[in-house]
Image (tube, grey):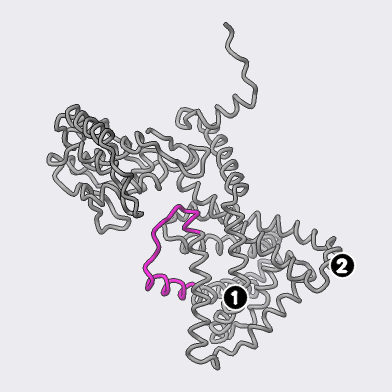
Amino acid sequence: MNPPVRSPWDRLETLVWSSPLAAMPRWQSRLVWLGRLAYALYRDSTQGYLSLQAMSLVYTTLLSLVPLLAVSFSVLKGFGAHNALEPLLLHALEPLGDQAPEIARNVLAFVDNMRVGVLGSLGLAILVYTVVSMIQKIEHVFNDTWRVTETRPFAQRVSQYLSVVLIGPVLFFTAVGLSASARNNALVESLLAVEPVGTLIDVGGSLVPFLLIVFTFAFIYIFVPNARVRVRSALIGALVAGVLWQTIGWLFAHFMVSSTQYTAIYSGLAILILFMIWLYIAWLIVLTGASVAFYHQHPEYLNSRARDLHLSNRLRERLALLVAGHCARTFLAGEPAWTADALSAALGLPSANTGRILQALEQDGFLLRTADAPPRYVPGRAPERVTVKSLLDAVRCFEEGESGCHGTVPDRGIAALERQLDESMAAALGGMTLRDLAAAMDGPHRAVQEGPAAGAVI
């Protein structure tokens, strides 16, 4: 019997999702990884993850834009740089075309009329709270992009948020001022008269706004999420977001030129509607760049078509044995302990899945986290005193009762069957300890795999 004829689409699908990247030539693995990345971004956009988050940030921005600019305006006024706020706002609203100056003037009029000095203690507290709440919402969205469930402590959040709001504008306008004053330098002016050096300086000067946008995005990707973001991944995501910002901004500006029908339909509300549309697009671009940075740093999330990998009970038990065994192995060998990210990379699994298992083992005292940054995991008890049966029981019972559910009404027949299964498992394992398990395991891949070479081993 002849095998069924497979379509080119089926063969392409098998190549992208079923073939291990490590077994491919480097050029082919890069192309497959880019294909997986494009699919992941398309999936996140169409399934609502990015679009819904961008919509929620539009609402938050509309409520908090004036207080945020008021705080930044007050800081910049102390440095005599408050007049530079309007050009920055105009640059951000440039895709709105001829409507940009009017919107910028209206926003700055609100800011100028808001006298921070006469607000009083309560008014100032509300102003700061509004700004902090906006950045907290942005952090929550970025944490969701980075699959982070833990939030920063309240005091740390307030201090970091205020640092970004108060110090960020000063650093930004310092960079703008340096780039502007560099052209007035005598040496630079003499070089401008020399060709082709003058042309190269002019081209470089035209790239300064783009580079400032890229570095601003990279700064956001590194410092906003409650995760350790690699500079290289942040820069790659920021570069993608910068290119999208310039390209889509240019297209939106051309759309604005031909959008006279919006003015005819919505009259005075047309400016507000178009402003909200651009805010949505802008946040969508920022979140797309953050997703690119995340997938670059965590390529293990591209091993599955699903956004989050859901493990079966059997695979959760296998992962628990792998994690506990690897931690015991390094401990007994006197090697450096594992971090959560290193374990995820070595096992080729998303950090969210590995983190849940680490949490289960840590909760029952099988593992302890060190005070390092990032924390490392070491056995909480002597490996020879921990049975494999107790490890499996901890994973099987993890989170039972935390939500208030204590199981169904016990049935004598089911209870007898559960006891029989439990006794059979204990007899089959025969008192095997974690030390025995570590000795029987193969050596893990110690090197943290970066880029598209990582692959699942479970």
Q: Quarter of the image for the N terminus: give it.
A: top right
Query: How many other residues sit within 10 Å of disc 1, few (<14), some (14-19) or many (≥20)?
Result: few
In the image, which disc is placed on residue 145? none
Q: Which residues are magenta?
A: 142-164
User: Residue 269 occupies which quadrant of the picture?
Assistant: bottom right
- Residue 166 image offset from top left, x and y in percent: 50, 77
Observer able to see residue 409? yes
Query: How many other residues sit within 10 Å of disc 2, few (<14), some (14-19) or many (≥20)?
Result: few
130 to the left or right of 183: left
At x 46%, y 56%, the residue is 231
Residue assigned mark 2 = 264
Q: Amino acid at mark 2?
A: Ala
Q: Residue furthest top?
A: 1
Position of residue 266 relative to residue 170, above or below, is above
Q: Amino acid at mark 1?
A: Gly
- Residue 293 image offset from top left, x and y in percent: 51, 51
Q: Quarter of the image for the C terminus: give it.
A: top left
Q: Nearer the viewer, residue 427 or 366?
A: 427
Q: Nearer the viewer, residue 89 or 106?
A: 106
Residue 154 in magenta? yes
In the image, which disc is placed on residue 177? 1
Question: Tag 1, which secondary structure?
Answer: helix
At x 46%, y 63%, the residue is 223
Q: Nearer the viewer, residue 381 or 413?
A: 413
Magenta-colored segment: predominant secondary structure: helix
Distance from label 1 to label 2 (Cα)?
Answer: 41 Å
In contact (CB < 8 Å): disc 1 and disc 2:
no
- Residue 83 image offset from top left, x and y in percent: 64, 82
At x 32%, y 46%, the residue is 407
Residue 228 in magenta? no
